[in-house]
Image: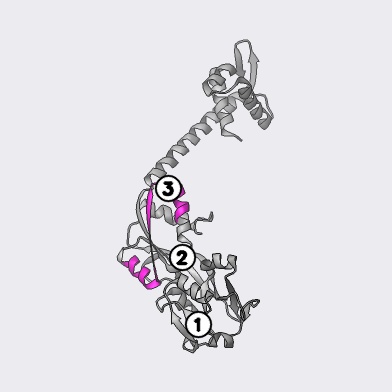
Amino acid sequence: MNLNYLRTFVVVAETGNLSETAQRLFLTQPAVTQQVKHLENHFAVQLIERNNRGVTLTEAGELLYDYACRIVTLYDQLEGNIENLRASVSGNLTIGATSIIGSYAVPCSIGLFKEKFPEARLKLKVGNRKQIMHDLKEGYVDIALIEGKDLKGPFVKWELATDELVIIAPNKDPWRGRSTLTMEEFKVQPLIMREADSGTRQDIEETLRSVKVDPSQLNIIVELANVDSIKAAVEAGVGISIMSRLALRKELYTKTLLALRLEGINFTQKIYLAYYKERVQSKLAKAFVNFLRSPNRGFC
């Protein structure tokens, strides 16, 4: 039901005159009549009776007037309270995020949050897992988004998502047309890896050990801390790598890189949201946490 119809009906009831209602609401009289008719059709009952002095309410009209007044008042109060909440969700919030999340997901989330709470000032700090964990403990960031192993320590935490890791190769021979490779092929390929402190690197090595593969057996030719540098090196044919699908949306769409799976192994990693348990969270921080945890695309 259109709330404006109820607003119009309230004025009709209070003036007892369709023409005066139209003047007050800057509508035409036929428009007022049409809105009342919509309500009568909706409730399948007559709401007003016309007479020489204007209109009077039927019994059903009196009942609707009582409820319409309350509904309109409650809605106006709701809008006012929401506006007050928007105004109160302000101030500064520093968000720490590991490299892939911070580069490929959090900026989108911040943009959506700013649409809802334009007074909020958000700062994003990106680093590897060790750096972000340190900053969270020391209070340099208020909230952290971290991929990798479960977080240990005095944190309030939630699992936001599960991300798939895939082997990436250049879209050219001998990789073109392939979707998998064997463990023996994988071991001998020139491999470009993230630095040792990376949560992604730790997850990869832990998964390999779970299937009795020693990470020292891999043919690692270079370690790079920057995700874009790794993608550029793979695209240039320097070697292959393992990377989050989250970081590959553009390259897989443009087909400059291929995503392959290692036979018999699924590489996945959890994405966590956390803040320090002993630190009081601001209204802005609580609003951002609730936003990220909401099912309506809070976390991109």
The residue closer to the viewer here, 198 or 188, is 188
**What amino acid is found at the position of numbered circle 1 in the picture?**
Leu
Q: In what element is the residue under mark 2?
A: helix
For mark 1, does the 10 Å Cα neighbourhood hold few (<14), some (14 to 19), or many (20 or more) residues? Answer: many
Q: What stretch is highlighted in magenta?
A: 110-137
The label on residue 101 is: 2
Residue 70 drawn at (x, y percent): 51, 31
The crowd level at tag 2 (other Cα within 10 Å; few <14, some 14-19, many 20+) is many
Q: Mark 3 points at which residue?
A: 117
Question: Marks 2 and 3, Cα distance to the nearest angstrom?
Answer: 22 Å
- Dot 3 lies on which element? loop
Residue position for label 1? 191
Q: Which tag is nearer the camera, tag 1 or tag 3?
A: 1
Tell me which label, 2 or 1, sits earlier in the chain.
Answer: 2
Q: Is residue 172 above or below residue 46?
A: below
Number of marks drawn: 3
Q: Which amino acid does label 3 sit on?
A: Phe
Q: Position of residue 3 (x, y in %)?
A: 56, 33
Name the element at disc 1. strand
- Going 43% across and 40% down the picture, which residue do you hit? 83
Q: Specify whether residue 266 is in view.
A: yes
Identified by mark 2, the residue type is Ile
Work out whether 200 lies above or below 113.
Answer: below
Quadrant holding the N terminus: top right
Q: Residues within 10 Å of mark 3 (few under 14, many from 20)?
A: many
Q: Is residue 127 magenta?
A: yes
